[in-house]
């Protein structure tokens, strides 16, 4: 006999034999007591409670477990979680589990929609009874959750999942949810289970729970299934856990996720495909998570593909082009990105509000490539005009990019008057940006670089020192500072700066600093020390290449990453530098070996062909040297060392070749007005022609420029 207290009254149920069928399996949906999805909030008043209790009193054929299930539901709806828990704990779920499994299995066999077959099978619990008991377990888990016992709540949820999965190992059959709430209760448990583990702090268990909800067809509606997939992706991306896939889920091919991030990306790509076919509604969070995941893994082109698949209504045209430009630029395709930004800022958008981020990004991309300097000036001016009215905090950025683009335009300018104007505009814009944002390191660095290029070495030194005071460990700043000091002919101090930077750097920065150190040693006429430094540099590059091949299991013919390509370029430059050293010390055989190694890395390198020409010239093979210089210029017509070397060869041919030599040298000075070698050779040409006054002026210019020349080009 069961005595239950509710609302101050007592009523007694005779405990009948444990019949699988009883009046308790009625659907108590009236009076606000429905257990349908999400409707457990107390939406009833005292009259409704009394009416429900009256129904319970009349249900004399209730068995013990079913009565407790109904009473527990009532207490839960009232918010009496302790009382509900006490009622639910009286249900012997462990003993009922086999009967529930059998009932689910038997009554879902060859089940037709809206069939009443479950009522007619003898000695087997009905699906409505099973649903009622499953609901009791679920409400018990909810009560435990409300009382802060999340681990115990998760264990209760697991009972529901184990019971149903044991009965339906292949998933939920169609139509089972039409005349009972079994599927509904199971779906609620599927969604609650991982959230309980998250609350308890067991993220690995949460990942396993999410996977369990996804590996079989449980008839989750598309929206709810997508929510589970998104939640799993978020845990995998941001949870900081690595939970390996169980053996039964592994696909033994290259498509199997190898990490949590890869699995998250797979989930998000599935969701995006559902959005594309309109199986689910657009969800901006999915795109945000996918953007983050593909960005941290460097798969920007794949991200661009999915941006292009987004329906036109989601983003405006300018926003879409801007998003795509970000993707392609991050993937290293700046030209493609710039073309997209031209669309976003072009005449087709003239009737719309100007898309400020596109102008700003266009100015930045143009500032990175001297060939787009003039276009960058236009972008930057537009940024400044727009910033004055709506984004004043970006005003200094507009002036920064304008200054950088003016500087680049000056370096490619043909006319001296135009170059002078651009240089002045460059310093004016950068100074304005530096005054407006005196804590912007990039502005101060850019100002220092422009001053260095214009040979304002003291100002450049002060700018870079100010920048170094504001940051620590900036390898780029250390390199520029060393170059400025070397331009002041303080080579030993420059080498000391590089040594300090080496102590704080690693990776590519360390390799570039080692090369700079070797170049400084060459400037100090220390070829042996420089050769040893290059040996260390090449050994480090080789070690990194072997480690990369070993870690990624790739062969050398495979496409290299951006860092690997930079290492290849640095390795080639190291061999070229060594070839130059050996040429200067008349070790021509060693020089030839080094050039050959450089050409194995990149055959069409103008500098390698130039060094080959120098070797041939050292052996008095002038015609062959001329051919090598010509090959170098055919690869890069503006390669200044080959232009000057060609002029030097022409000067050796006699007076009749002097006008051609002068033309070559004037072209070199047009490209680089501060090149002291070009000025010196131009002085020699003038001297040979008898123009001694002009020659003296050229020699004076060469001398002064050499006194302020860095060991490497400012960049």
Image: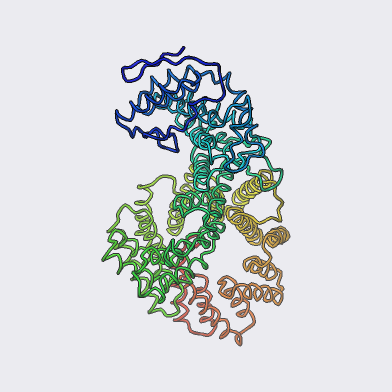
Kindly indicate the quadrant of the structure image that contains residue 387. bottom left
Please say if 292 is above or below 354.
Answer: above
Q: Which residue lies furthest to the bottom in this view?
A: 656
Q: With 183 as the anchor, is 430 left or right in this view?
A: left
- Residue situated in front as seen by the camera: 29 or 375: 29
Protein image colouring? rainbow
Please say if 301 is above or below 29.
Answer: below
Q: Residue at x 59, y 26 (%)?
A: 125
Residue 549 seen in render: yes
Measured as percent of width and height from the top left, residue 240 is found at: 51, 37
Please say if 242 is above or below 291.
Answer: above
Residue 711 seen in render: no
Q: Which residue is drawn at 52% across and 41% down?
A: 232
Q: With 137 as the anchor, is 582 left or right in this view?
A: right
Q: Which residue lies furthest to the left in this view?
A: 389
Measured as percent of width and height from the top left, residue 216 is found at: 62, 40
Measured as percent of width and height from the top left, residue 134 is found at: 52, 28
Kindly indicate the quadrant of the structure image that contains residue 590. bottom right
Q: Residue furthest top?
A: 1
Measured as percent of width and height from the top left, residue 525 is found at: 56, 55
- Residue situated in front as seen by the camera: 457 or 49: 49
Please say if 76 is above or below 296.
Answer: above
Query: Number of labelled discs?
Result: 0
- Residue situated in front as seen by the camera: 130 or 428: 130
Kindly indicate the quadrant of the structure image that contains residue 411. bottom left
């Amino acid at each position: 006999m069961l005595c239950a207290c509710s609302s101050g009254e007592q009523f007694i149920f005779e405990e009948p034999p444990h019949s699988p069928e009883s009046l308790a399996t009625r659907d108590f949906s009236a009076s606000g007591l429905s257990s349908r999805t999400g409707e457990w909030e107390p939406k009833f008043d005292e009259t409704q409670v009394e009416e429900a209790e009256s129904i319970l009193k009349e249900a004399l054929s209730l068995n013990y477990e079913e009565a407790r299930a109904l009473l527990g539901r009532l207490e839960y709806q009232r918010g009496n979680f302790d009382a509900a828990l006490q009622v639910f704990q009286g249900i012997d779920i462990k003993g009922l589990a086999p009967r529930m499994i059998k009932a689910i299995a038997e009554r879902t066999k060859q089940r037709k929609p809206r069939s009443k077959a479950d009522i007619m099978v003898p000695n087997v619990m009905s699906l409505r009874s099973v649903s009622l008991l499953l609901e009791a377990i679920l409400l018990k888990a909810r009560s435990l959750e409300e009382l802060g016992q999340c681990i115990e709540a998760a264990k209760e949820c697991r009972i529901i999942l184990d019971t149903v999965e044991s009965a339906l190992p292949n998933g939920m059959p169609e139509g089972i949810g039409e005349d009972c709430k079994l599927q509904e209760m199971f779906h609620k448990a599927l969604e609650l289970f991982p959230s309980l583990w998250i609350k308890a702090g067991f993220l690995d268990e949460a990942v396993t729970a999410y996977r369990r909800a996804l590996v079989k067809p449980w008839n989750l509606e598309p929206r709810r299934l997508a929510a589970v997939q998104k939640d799993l992706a978020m845990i995998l991306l941001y949870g900081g856990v690595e939970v390996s896939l169980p053996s039964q889920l592994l696909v033994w091919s290259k498509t199997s996720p190898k990490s949590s991030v890869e699995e998250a990306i797979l989930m998000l790509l599935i969701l995006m495909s559902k959005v594309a076919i309109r199986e689910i509604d657009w969800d901006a969070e999915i795109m945000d998570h996918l953007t983050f995941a593909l960005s941290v893994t460097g798969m920007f082109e794949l991200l661009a593909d999915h941006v292009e698949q987004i329906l036109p209504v989601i983003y405006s045209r300018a926003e879409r082009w801007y998003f795509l430009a970000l993707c392609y630029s991050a993937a290293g395709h700046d030209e493609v990105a710039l073309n997209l930004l031209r669309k976003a800022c072009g005449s087709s958008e003239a009737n719309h509000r100007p898309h400020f981020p596109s102008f700003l990004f266009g100015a930045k991309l143009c500032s990175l490539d001297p060939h787009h300097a003039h276009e960058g000036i236009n972008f930057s001016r537009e940024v400044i005009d727009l910033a004055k009215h709506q984004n004043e905090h970006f005003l200094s950025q507009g002036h920064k990019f304008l200054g950088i683009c003016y500087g680049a335009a000056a370096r490619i300018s043909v006319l001296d008057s135009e170059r002078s104007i651009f240089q002045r505009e460059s310093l004016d814009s950068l100074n304005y940006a530096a005054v407006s944002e005196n804590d912007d390191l990039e502005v101060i660095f850019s100002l220092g670089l422009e001053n260095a290029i214009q040979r304002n070495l003291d100002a450049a030194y002060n700018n870079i020192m100010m920048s170094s005071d504001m940051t620590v460990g900036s390898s780029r700043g250390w390199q520029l500072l060393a170059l400025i000091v070397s331009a002041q002919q303080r080579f030993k101090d420059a080498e000391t700066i590089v040594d300090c930077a080496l102590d704080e750097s690693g990776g590519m920065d360390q390799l570039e600093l080692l090369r700079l150190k070797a170049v400084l040693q060459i400037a100090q006429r220390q070829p042996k020390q420089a050769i040893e430094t290059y040996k260390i540099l090449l050994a480090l590059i080789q070690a990194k290449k072997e480690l990369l091949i070993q870690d990624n299991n790739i062969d050398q013919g495979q496409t290299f990453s951006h860092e690997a390509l930079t290492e290849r370029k640095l390795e080639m430059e190291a061999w070229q530098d060594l070839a130059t050293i050996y040429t200067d010390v008349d070790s021509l055989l060693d020089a030839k070996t080094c050039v050959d190694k450089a050409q194995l890395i990149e055959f069409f390198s103008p500098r390698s062909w130039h060094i080959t020409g120098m070797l041939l010239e050292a052996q008095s093979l002038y015609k062959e040297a001329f051919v090598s210089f010509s090959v170098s210029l055919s690869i890069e017509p503006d390669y200044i060392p080959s232009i000057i070397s060609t002029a030097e060869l022409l000067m050796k041919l006699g007076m009749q070749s002097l006008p051609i030599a002068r033309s070559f040298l004037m072209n070199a000075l047009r490209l680089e007005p501060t090149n002291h070698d070009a000025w010196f050779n131009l002085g020699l040409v003038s001297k040979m022609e008898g123009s001694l006054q002009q020659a003296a002026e050229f020699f004076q210019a060469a001398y002064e420029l050499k006194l302020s020349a860095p060991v490497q080009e400012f960049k």
